Image (cartoon, rainbow, N blue to C red):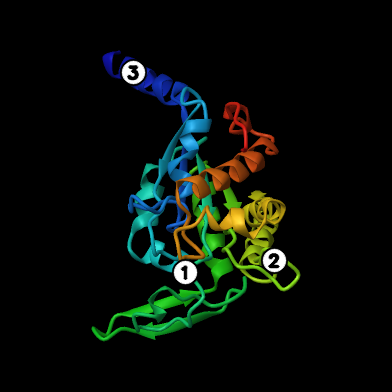
């Protein structure tokens, strides 16, 4: 009887705890540098902590490939419980050709195909490298298997402008592929790239420049991370789930 009571009590606590929102990604999501900021480090400020707790597991410099290879995804997967959320935002570190050099360590195959490449490291250990889309696909499937709710986000835009005076989009590569996997796997998608880029277009190059570390077109300062967090919140508000109900009021200035 005592054991039954403990089991029921434990189940009650799990069912009544706030959902966890795990975030995985790169330095644009989380950065330990006091000058650089990622939007995931700010997001909890705008979410009701009685309903959801943010657990930002993103790590600077990681790609979909290295986040898995280093065991970071396994750590998240081990902690995931049914009803938790997983936000997935990668794309900034995947661009190099995958190989065993320092430059190629983070690279993945382009696209969403299921093709692969076998690499042999100097210690004779073999590694199978997949496409960007396949890594996203595996994150989603494994999160779903735990009863969690995956949400894919496109990468935040870099501070790069076209000749037409618009921020460069990622709608022909990583942003496009992220959206395609979300559609294929029937999970929610937040087009963070377009949401933020549209805002950047509106405020213009001089104002956008103030949101990034000097001389850096990728890493945002605190103000820039807040703008990206606002874009994430806009995306969350459009989702038809309990996460959208946890958003507190905010004002984009």
Name the residue nearer the viewer: 104 or 182. 104
Give the quarter of the figure containing the C terminus: top right
For mark 3, does the 10 Å Cα neighbourhood hold few (<14), some (14 to 19), or many (20 or more) residues?
Answer: few
Residue at 33% across, 63% down: 70
SS class of the residue under badge 1? Answer: loop
Residue at image mark 3 = 4
The numbered disc on residue 93 is: 1
Residue at image mark 2 = 171
Residue at 46% across, 59% down: 219
Whether label 2 touches label 3, CB < 8 Å? no
Say left or right for 152 vs 27: right
Residue 213 image offset from top left, x and y in percent = 45, 58
For mark 1, does the 10 Å Cα neighbourhood hold few (<14), some (14 to 19), or many (20 or more) residues?
Answer: many
- In whole angstroms, how far apart are the C-alphas of marks 1 and 3? 49 Å
SS class of the residue under badge 2? Answer: loop
- In whole angstroms, how far apart are the C-alphas of marks 2 and 1? 16 Å
Say left or right for 189 vs 78: right
Give the quarter of the figure containing the N terminus: top left
Does the rendering let one see residue 145? no
Residue 217 image offset from top left, x and y in percent = 51, 65
SS class of the residue under badge 3? Answer: helix
* First in residue order: circle 1 vs circle 3: 3
Relative to 222, say whether 68 is above or below: below
Relative to 6, say whether 102 is above or below: below
Whether label 1 touches label 3, CB < 8 Å? no
């Amino acid at each position: 009887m005592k054991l039954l009571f403990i089991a029921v009590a434990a189940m009650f606590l799990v069912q009544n705890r706030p959902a966890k929102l795990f975030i995985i990604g790169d330095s644009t999501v989380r950065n330990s540098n006091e000058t650089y900021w990622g939007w995931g480090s700010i997001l909890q400020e705008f979410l009701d902590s009685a309903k959801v707790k943010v657990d930002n597991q993103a790590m600077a410099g990681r790609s979909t490939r290295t986040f898995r290879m280093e065991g970071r995804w396994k750590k998240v997967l081990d902690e995931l419980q049914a009803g938790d959320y997983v936000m997935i935002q990668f794309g900034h570190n995947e661009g190099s050709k995958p190989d065993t050099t320092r430059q190629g360590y983070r690279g993945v195959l382009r696209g969403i195909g299921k093709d692969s490449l076998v690499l042999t490291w100097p210690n004779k250990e073999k590694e199978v490298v997949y496409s960007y889309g396949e890594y996203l696909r595996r994150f989603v499937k494994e999160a779903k298997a735990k009863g969690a709710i995956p949400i894919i986000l496109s990468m935040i835009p870099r501070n790069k402008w076209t000749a037409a005076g618009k921020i460069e989009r990622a709608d022909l590569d990583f942003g496009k592929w992220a959206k395609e996997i979300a559609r294929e796997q029937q999970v929610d998608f937040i087009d963070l790239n377009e949401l933020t880029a549209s805002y950047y277009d509106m405020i213009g190059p001089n104002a956008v420049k103030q949101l990034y570390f000097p001389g850096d077109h990728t890493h945002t300062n605190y103000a820039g991370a807040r703008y990206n967090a606002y874009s994430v919140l806009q995306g969350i508000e459009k989702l038809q789930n309990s996460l959208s109900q946890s958003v507190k009021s905010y004002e984009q200035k």
